[in-house]
Amino acid sequence: MIKRPLKKISIEEIARGLFEDGMISQLDAGRLVKSAKLSKHHPLIIAARAELKNNLRAGEVLSSEILTQWFAEKNEFTYLDIDPLKLDIETITRLLPKAFIKRIGVLPVEVTPGKVIFATAEPFHLDWLLDTSAAIKRDISVVMANPEKIDRYIQEFYDVRSAMSQIGESDADLGDTQALDKMAGVLKSEFAVDDGSVAKVVDWIFQYAKTERATDIHMEPRDGFAQMRFRIDGNLRVVYKFEPSAFIPILSRIKIMADMKVDEKRRPQDGRIKRNLGDGRLVEMRLSTIPTHYGEKLVIRIFDTGLASKSFEDLGFTTEDIKTWEGLIGSNYGLILVTGPTGSGKTTTLQTSLSRIAGPELNICTVEDPVELVNDNFAQMQVHGDIGLTFGNAIRSFLRQDPDVIMVGEIRDQDAGDMAIQASLTGHLVLSTLHTNSALASITRLLDLGVQSHLLSASLLGILAQRLVRVLCPHCKQKIPTPMDLWKIVVGPYKVNVPETVFGPIGCRECKQTGYKGRIVVYEMVRINQDLKDIIRPDVTLNELELKMRGKYLPLRLNALQKVLQGKTGLEEIIKVII
């Protein structure tokens, strides 16, 4: 074991080490020492705020995380990039009081019956070890972590824990119904004002979801507890567990914010919240509750209003296909379909398409179930089956509103299909979605619904089938020898030259060790030609359609493979999403 002196890190030590390792110049090292004389911050934070460029890596600025990892490795300490999603907040905040944790500047990051791992930004200064070990009656292991993250999570996690405790204590002697009624009364009277602990926790939940790039928040009651999960890049992860006494008032506040009935727990409800989460951009949240065996489950779908302003390039379309698609959506009339399973990005593609053609000269009307992204450039309507406002009836109403473009959320039945085609044949551009596995399967699906083949043939302009796949993290992806077993699965019946290497996921701090960051579209785009129109009849099969169009469009599987070869995604991801 290396015997180390008990001391605190100094800015002189950091500046000297960075210079000796060739990461900064002697001039920068001198400036760094001078600038730190009046600062009370940790030396690694001071160095990070100087925004020094790393001479060893072009374009890299020495952030606090990079500097922490460098210092830990240079001095042979174990380095940890703290991922809050992997921390059991409830357990670590129960271990020791906040005042003590804050005074010694350490954060428990893993707690087991026999051992606790603490993260510190002062790995030489360990005079707290013996007393702490005696207090918690467990062995202690120490890792080095970013001082900014340690300070942030100490404050954030203990504040949330304190708020949770206050909520639980305030309602400890009340039954579930009484607690709910009490919260409803408080929130209804002054929910717009900060009403303490509940408001603090709810704000933290929304901000935490935004920070972690969550697209959905699941709040679920279980036997004796409740849990919160985030869906990030398509995968669900448990991020917090609540006491039942805290869960009820938190759920109640969120329901009030979404204009939902707080005292209705037996029936499913829908609502929406529109909030600014701190960066000046509004975030739309769509809420849905359902009754379960243990109580109400709430799912919050998060829609970034900035998505509609994304370019087709951002979504993952090639330059050639963008021209084709823009030609389709620029048509004066006809039917365009976007297909794929739930969660495949159809709404984003349609919103981006409509935003591209929107302008003062066009009247764009949409009917959706529900309206997911509110856009002031469109007239948006939500279907209500209980009052007879179906997709088909909505299109009938639109036709009396002098529309130029109509977007139909989904063609679910013959009435909606017939009305969409009628609108497209009478001088309107109609965009809609279907749930099919491929582009050409949309044709047989519409025929199965009872749509007349000659009208479908006359109106259909193009079909886009798509899926969402995770993007390989640009910071850590690496070339690996092509795994032949995976390659054969992805290629399937197609003949494609095998490359020696492909990019694979590795994992780093930028992608939270997942190897992936963000998602893009893989797709197949079929532009309807006369040959295809000629064979659309009531009894046409999918096999006939595919034979007729073979070689005239790039199938979904090959488009996905193309993105693998371009280093945008991995073979495992393609198998998971498409095969």
Image: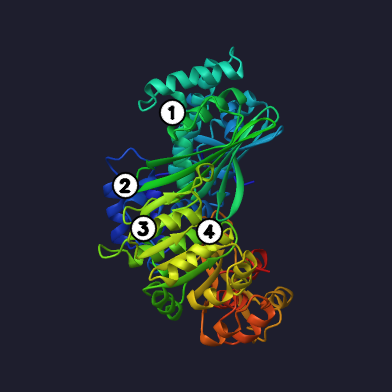
Circle 3/circle 2 CB separation < 8 Å: no
User: Of circles 3 and 2, which is in front?
Assistant: 3
Circle 1/circle 4 CB separation < 8 Å: no
Figure check: 167 above or below 518: above
Q: CA distance from mark 4 to mark 3?
A: 20 Å
Picture disc at residue 400:
3
State the image coordinates of residue 159 (x, y, percent, origin top left): 47, 29
Q: Secondary structure at mark 1?
A: helix
Which sits in the foreground, 559 or 49? 559
User: Of circles 1 and 4, which is in front?
Assistant: 4
Number of residues whose C-alpha sits closer than 10 Å to that of mark 1, classed few (under 14), some (14–19) or many (20 or more): many
What residue does disc 1 label? 199
Left or right for 290, reference 276: right
Which sits in the foreground, 358 or 196? 358
Figure check: 570 above or below 155: below
Q: CA distance from mark 1 to mark 2?
A: 20 Å
Q: Earlier in the sequence, mark 1 or mark 4?
A: 1
Picture disc at residue 280:
2
Q: CA distance from mark 2 to mark 4?
A: 32 Å
Q: Secondary structure at mark 3?
A: loop
What residue does disc 4 label? 410
Q: Earlier in the sequence, mark 4 or mark 3?
A: 3
